[in-house]
Image: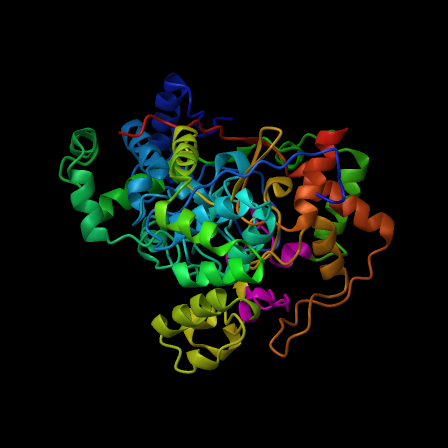
């Protein structure tokens, strides 16, 4: 994002894995962090710390990020953003997507983790 | 010349192709070592003849996520028609929460390959088809359960009855999948035309590459026949992918595979033993199957673990005489190709072996 500052836009959609214990609450954690302006930071934590994504661990990550813990915890307890999460899941199913991560770069579908250079090549092509 | 090629989206050509396959299956010529041949009719086992209905059934199963334990993966997940019947990843996609440890090979012209898998553990496509379904880190499905699950789908019950004259079994699932996979073919590449006598089929650059491939490069020592493989196994010193030891989930997959293969020291394993896990013969340590070479632009990254991202990387590797390993095949020695020779070889590999690939559209999965 830094390399293409102002030229590209990243939109993240949630697709918590249905058989994973903490995937839904982790999605909620990222949105609760978004409320406090720390989505990217929390997202990084989630990827780095997975599969330690139980509630206590998520709260400890929020603490390390300096978030308002009562607000954050309340969001987890009430699944404050569940409608957004369910909306995103429906979008994935409607698009016949089942694998995470799946990327669309100007409509070009890329499935699975890829090295940075892989994305860079596509982005450069799309920016031409 | 009649080709058994199936344009899957066209029912009329499907019927014709299936009929042709039935008629000419016995005329297959076996690729002999150390020289190249134009593409011929693919071999079809006598106990699983190609029929239109079976191919269609196999295609539906190929796209059906019921074949995986959690319903998120089909064969297409790792063998996507839109990405060269592979997934364009160094290490193949895997069952959610697990990691794979090897590259997903393209299915293009897989009908000509035998044995199957990088380590050759399956002797036929029929045998191969069940492995990924059962694998804990691939589709993670229980085959007894799958049989019952498919028996609950009336369209499948009818289709199996029509195709096989009986109920759904794992063997018949595999036979249908194999029949479909035999239709995934790249044909009419410039080299095929050249080998069939059209001297103008290759550009001058491609022809130079061809001469290097068959001469100085000694590539046909292993990449021979119509699909550019002798179907044998070699240790060429490919470096291990660092994820084998850097990612605990990949390490777990490697050691699990070694464990179920009967390798006693699996807990301390830090490298991919390759064919050794199948034969337990020391000469096969880190030996992998010679891959076919058609449609190479679609099937990167290369090698059993995807460590080479481009065909240039591969050419450099062989120009150096391969990698370093105490068990490396004596067939490899430095070639010291010039830059011009490398470019010619690249043109040959990427352009002269590129033909018309079977187009597959997603069917209506019941």
| Residue depicted at 51% across the width and 26% down the height | B1
Q: Residue at x 26, y 43 (%)?
A: B173
Q: Is residue B193 left or right of residue A2?
A: left
> Which image quadrant for residue B155?
top left
Q: Was residue B341 drawn as part of the magenta stretch in this picture? A: no
Residue B244 located within the stretch drawn in magenta:
yes
- Give B20 or B107, whichever is nearer the viewer: B107
Q: Judge whether B94 appears above or below A91 on screen.
A: below
What secondary structure predominates along the stretch shown in magenta?
A: loop
- Residue occupying image coordinates x 53% and y 63%: B288
Asked if residue B311 lies left or right of residue A25, the reply is right
Instruction: Examine the rendering and report whether any part of residue B328 can be seen.
Output: yes
Magenta-drawn segment? B219-245
Residue at x 52%, y 70% (from the top left corner): B272
Q: Nearer the viewer, residue B1 or A63?
A: A63
Q: Nearer the viewer, residue A60 or B273?
A: A60
Q: Would residue B169 be seen by someone viewing this image from the given angle?
A: no
Quadrant for the C terminus of chain B in the image: top left
């Amino acid at each position: 994002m830094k390399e293409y500052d102002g030229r590209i836009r990243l939109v993240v959609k949630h697709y918590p894995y249905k058989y994973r214990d903490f995937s839904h609450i982790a999605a909620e954690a990222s949105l609760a962090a978004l409320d406090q302006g720390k989505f990217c930071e929390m997202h990084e934590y989630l990827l780095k710390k997975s599969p330690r994504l139980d509630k206590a661990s998520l709260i400890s990550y929020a603490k390390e990020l300096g978030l308002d813990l009562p607000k954050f915890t309340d969001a987890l307890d009430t699944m404050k953003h569940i409608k957004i999460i369910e909306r995103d899941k429906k979008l994935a199913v409607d698009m016949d997507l089942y694998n995470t991560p799946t990327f669309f770069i100007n409509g070009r579908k890329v499935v699975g983790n890829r090295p940075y250079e892989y994305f860079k090549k596509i982005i450069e092509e799309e920016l031409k | 010349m009649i080709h058994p090629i199936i344009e899957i989206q066209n029912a009329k050509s499907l019927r014709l192709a299936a009929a042709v396959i039935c008629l000419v299956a016995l005329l297959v010529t076996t690729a002999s070592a150390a020289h190249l041949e134009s593409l011929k009719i693919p071999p079809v086992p006598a106990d699983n003849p190609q029929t239109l209905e079976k191919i269609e059934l196999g295609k539906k199963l190929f796209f059906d996520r019921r074949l995986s334990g959690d319903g998120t993966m089909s064969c297409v997940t790792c063998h996507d028609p839109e990405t060269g019947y592979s997934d364009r990843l160094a290490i193949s996609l895997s069952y959610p929460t697990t990691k794979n440890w090897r590259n997903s090979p393209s299915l293009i012209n897989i009908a000509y390959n035998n044995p199957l898998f990088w380590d050759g553990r399956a002797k036929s496509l029929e045998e191969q088809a069940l492995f990924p379904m059962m694998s804990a880190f691939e589709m993670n499905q229980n085959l007894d359960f799958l049989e019952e699950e498919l028996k609950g789908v009336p369209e499948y019950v009818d289709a199996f009855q029509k195709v096989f004259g009986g109920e759904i079994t794992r063997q018949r699932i595999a036979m249908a999948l194999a029949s479909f996979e035999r239709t995934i073919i790249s044909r009419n590449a410039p080299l095929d035309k050249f080998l069939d006598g059209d001297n103008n089929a290759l550009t001058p650059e491609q022809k130079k590459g061809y001469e290097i491939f068959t001469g100085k490069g000694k590539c046909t020592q292993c990449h021979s026949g119509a699909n550019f493989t002798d179907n044998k196994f070699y240790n060429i010193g490919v470096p291990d992918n660092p994820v084998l030891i850097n990612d605990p989930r990949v390490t777990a997959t490697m050691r699990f595979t070694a464990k179920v293969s009967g390798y006693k020291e699996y807990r301390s394993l830090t490298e991919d033993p390759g064919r050794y896990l199948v034969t337990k013969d020391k000469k096969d340590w880190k030996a992998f199957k010679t891959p076919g070479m058609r449609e190479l632009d679609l099937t990167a990254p290369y090698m059993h673990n995807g460590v080479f991202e481009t065909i240039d990387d591969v050419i450099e590797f062989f120009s150096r005489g391969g990698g370093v390993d105490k068990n490396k095949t004596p067939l490899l020695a430095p070639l010291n190709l010039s830059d011009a020779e490398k470019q010619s070889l690249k043109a040959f590999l990427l352009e002269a072996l590129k033909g018309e690939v079977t187009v597959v559209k997603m069917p209506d999965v019941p």
